[in-house]
Image: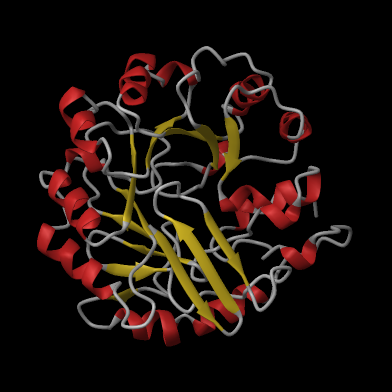
Amino acid sequence: MIVRRHSTGYNFLGDTGTGLTLRWADGVGENPVYAPWPELADISISNHCSKGCDFCYRDSKEDNSFMTIGQYEKVLAGLQHERWGTVFQVALGGGEPLEHPDFKKIIQATCDRGIVANFTTNGERLNEDIVGFLRGKIGALAISAARIDQIDTGILRLLAGNEIRTNLHFILDNRSIAQGIDMLRGKYNDILKHVNSVIFLTYKPKGRAQADKCLELDSNLRMFLNLVNKNKCSCSVGFDACFVPLLMKHTEVNVDCIDSCECGFFSVYIDENMNVKPCSFASDDSYSFNLNDCDFKVIWGKKYDKYRKEVLKNRCNSSDCANKSQCRGKCVYFEDLQFCYVN
């Protein structure tokens, strides 16, 4: 199904079958400032997880903090607009989504509204039953890992056999970057045989994740960046928005083909308590509004105006970046994520 949105200064086209999305302003050579309605909603359906990863930015525990199916239906209803329709896709997270008692109902409810469902998992609860259920129902799933030995190739084969597009979310910190370098050199291509894409996620000092593992612009990071354009990885390679300033400043990636931070501009985050925030990594509640108290149209259309103006100030003080005008600059939440240049 093709989803289209057209208005002054914003045009969008999305293919629910392939996941392809296109976005332009009044002309195809212009970028819109923000969307009149979000294209993607990042939804934490719980903060319950039994694994206890030390890099967990949500500090998830076995505490049964689940969004109910009724609350999820209310969230989806709130994301429905009389002119723009609903969001193009959702990214479901947690906690661990597969530990949610109503996970299957949540996936089905998403499909019933014509929304592309995606989710992130640690992969430990993937089995033939759940994979069989997911076949034909989701756009993609992502398995998170901080080390290459955490990747279960048997699960990857099972997912591939059921034609489920599978990405690897590899947490990039100042220790795992050594394996990230080897990944770009093609060392792990056999392991990545059934992976659609490796998405490198910037380590964030939030939750259980401590600041001592944050990336710095050192020799390892420079080597990693040098390999981006000439990588030998067997699958495609991508990055989260937090890494984009580095790509714009230190690689030859075509900046017209990548987007700077989209939080609060084209995407939105909703947690298991129905709090709406620009980003799941928000370190304070200055732009947090609850759907029980405030209509989503008011949040997106009015209350986030101040946030967008703040971000568009571009707090980056780099004096020699050729792509500064296309970058949203320093993260408004974490000073630690400013490492594309040295002060």
Q: Quadrant of the N terminus?
A: bottom left
Q: Does residue 13 sit above or below 308 in this rendering?
A: above
All told, the count of numbered labels is 0
Q: Residue furthest right?
A: 320
Rendered location of residue 284, percent (x, y):
42, 67
Residue at left offset 12%, top offset 58%: 68
Q: How is the image coloured?
A: secondary structure
Q: Residue furthest front?
A: 1
Q: Does residue 261 sit above or below 132 in this rendering?
A: below
Q: Is residue 39 visible?
A: no
Q: Is residue 212 visible?
A: yes
Rendered location of residue 164, percent (x, y):
35, 32
Q: Which residue occupies the foreground of this view, 77 or 62?
A: 77
In this picture, residue 102 sits left or right of residue 207: left
Q: Which residue occupies the foreground of this view, 66 or 175?
A: 66
Q: Which residue occupies the foreground of this view, 89 or 202?
A: 89
Residue at left offset 37%, top offset 82%: 83
In the picture, residue 119 is in which quadrant? top left
Rendered location of residue 322, percent (x, y):
86, 59
Residue at left offset 57%, top offset 16%: 189
Residue at left offset 72%, top offset 29%: 220
In this picture, residue 303 sits left or right of residue 34: left
In the picture, residue 289 is in which quadrant? bottom left
In the picture, residue 212 is in which quadrant? top right
Q: Quadrant of the C terminus?
A: bottom right
Rendered location of residue 89, percent (x, y):
37, 57
